[in-house]
Image (tube, grey):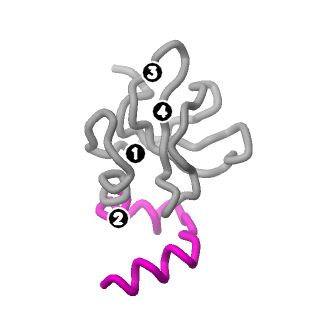
Amino acid sequence: MAVIEVGRVCMKIAGREAGKFCVVVDTPKDGFVTVTGPRQITRIKRRKCNITHIEPTRNIFNISEGSDDSAVEKAWNASGLIEKLKIQVPTKFRQKKESKE
């Protein structure tokens, strides 16, 4: 069983996004994975990331490889981890979401 797998919630420990949570959306290849926040929730945009720059948590989302940001956002909302991990959603995205409902 690989520790870094598709759907694994990780914390970035290096770079400008250090200390923020992300989700792995592509399998490790040559020491790199593709991660996303998505930007509406954790302010991390989809990008390639070195596996030494992320630290996996025990949380895993049930998403398929290469999932788009909307599927990852639904997984965040369904899991309840936003409140548990005390992630502060940016106010401009919070207001947009509330106005849709």
Q: Viewer-nearest of labels 1 and 3?
A: 3
**96 magenta-colored:** yes
Residue at image x 30%, y 84%? 101
Q: Position of residue 96 (x, y in %)?
A: 45, 79
Along the viewing direction, whichever of 60 and 89 lies nearer the viewer: 89
> Which SS type dominates the magenta stretch?
helix
Q: Viewer-nearest of labels 4 and 1?
A: 4
Above/below status of 35 relative to 21: above
**62 magenta-colored:** no
Q: CA distance from mark 4 to mark 1?
A: 17 Å
Q: Viewer-nearest of labels 4 and 2?
A: 4
Label ID, residue 77: 2
**SS class of the residue under badge 4?**
strand
Mark 4 is surrounded, within 10 Å at the Cα level, by few (under 14), some (14 to 19) or many (20 or more) other residues, namely: many
Part of the protein shown in magenta: 76-101
**SS class of the residue under badge 3?**
strand
Along the viewing direction, whichever of 39 and 57 lies nearer the viewer: 39
Q: Amino acid at mark 1?
A: Asn
